């Protein structure tokens, strides 16, 4: 089976982030044919400024765009801040979405998941993130949704995901992402240019 390379991005900068732990679990439990690498430089990306968005943008921005462009797909774990996505994640996506006509995000395959301590498991943040990807015409996995609610009950003290239902849902989501990517590679005529 052809292996697809997925770039995983956590929307949290916190050292003990549950969303980052969720991505590590995705690495550990990935289905066959899926290789996941964790992007770890989100905090180095400057605030978006059109004056800096030139042929020579900041190094961290160049590295982000290159990492996204080289990946077959993205796996994004987002916390929920004030019913939406964290500013640091939106900022990175704003940089990655430029220039619009040749963006690294254009038609990129994406899966979204998230963990939260409350009962709604980042559902509103994930909806907000889906809106961002409408503009970039990214191909977001619709189902299954991975909404990890009451996340403290699903990880052990070493931040290992222990909840079998969440692990299985995550594996299913990654399988759909893998198959979506491989399907687009084998059937290039199904994609539309914008």
Image: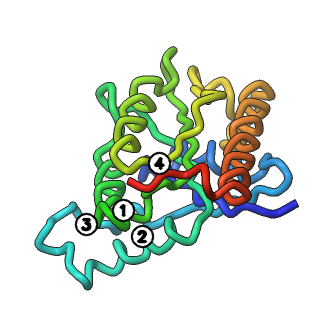
Q: Of callouts 4 and 3, which one flags the residue occurring earlier in the amino acid sequence? A: 3
Which residue is outermost to the front? 189
Q: Alpha-carbon distance for marks 3 and 2? A: 13 Å
Q: Of callouts 3 and 2, which one flags the residue occurring earlier in the amino acid sequence? A: 3
Q: Of callouts 1 and 2, which one flags the residue occurring earlier in the amino acid sequence? A: 2
User: Of tags 1 and 4, which is closer to the observer?
Assistant: 4
Residue that label 4 marks: 138
At horizontal 50% and vertical 28% (from top left) the residue drawn is 116
From the top left corner, tell me how far across and down residue 24 is, in percent: 67, 51
Q: Alpha-carbon distance for marks 1 and 3? A: 12 Å
At horizontal 28% and vertical 78% (from top left) the residue drawn is 58
The answer to whether residue 175 of the structure is visible from this angle is yes
Residue that label 3 marks: 46
Q: Quick one: quadrant of the N terminus?
A: bottom right
Residue that label 2 marks: 65
| Figure label count | 4
Instruction: Answer with the quarter of the image where residue 54 lies.
Output: bottom left
What secondary structure is marked by label 1?
A: helix
Q: Of callouts 4 and 2, which one flags the residue occurring earlier in the amino acid sequence? A: 2
């Amino acid at each position: 089976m052809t292996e697809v390379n997925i770039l995983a991005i956590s929307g949290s900068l916190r050292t003990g982030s549950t969303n980052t732990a969720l991505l590590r679990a995705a690495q550990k439990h990935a289905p066959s044919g899926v290789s996941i690498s964790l992007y770890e430089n989100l905090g180095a990306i400057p605030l978006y400024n059109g004056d800096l968005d030139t042929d020579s943008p900041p190094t961290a921005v160049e590295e982000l765009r290159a990492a996204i462009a080289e990946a077959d797909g993205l796996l994004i774990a987002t916390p929920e801040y004030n019913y939406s996505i964290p500013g640091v994640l939106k900022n990175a996506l704003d940089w990655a979405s430029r220039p619009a006509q040749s963006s690294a995000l254009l038609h990129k395959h994406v899966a979204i998941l998230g963990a939260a301590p409350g009962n709604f498991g980042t559902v509103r943040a994930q909806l907000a993130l889906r809106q961002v990807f409408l503009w970039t015409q990214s191909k977001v996995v619709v189902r299954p949704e991975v909404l990890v609610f009451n996340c403290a009950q699903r990880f052990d003290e070493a931040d290992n995901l222990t909840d079998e239902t969440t692990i299985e849902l995550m594996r299913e989501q990654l399988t759909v992402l893998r198959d979506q990517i491989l399907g687009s590679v084998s059937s290039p005529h199904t994609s539309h240019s914008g």
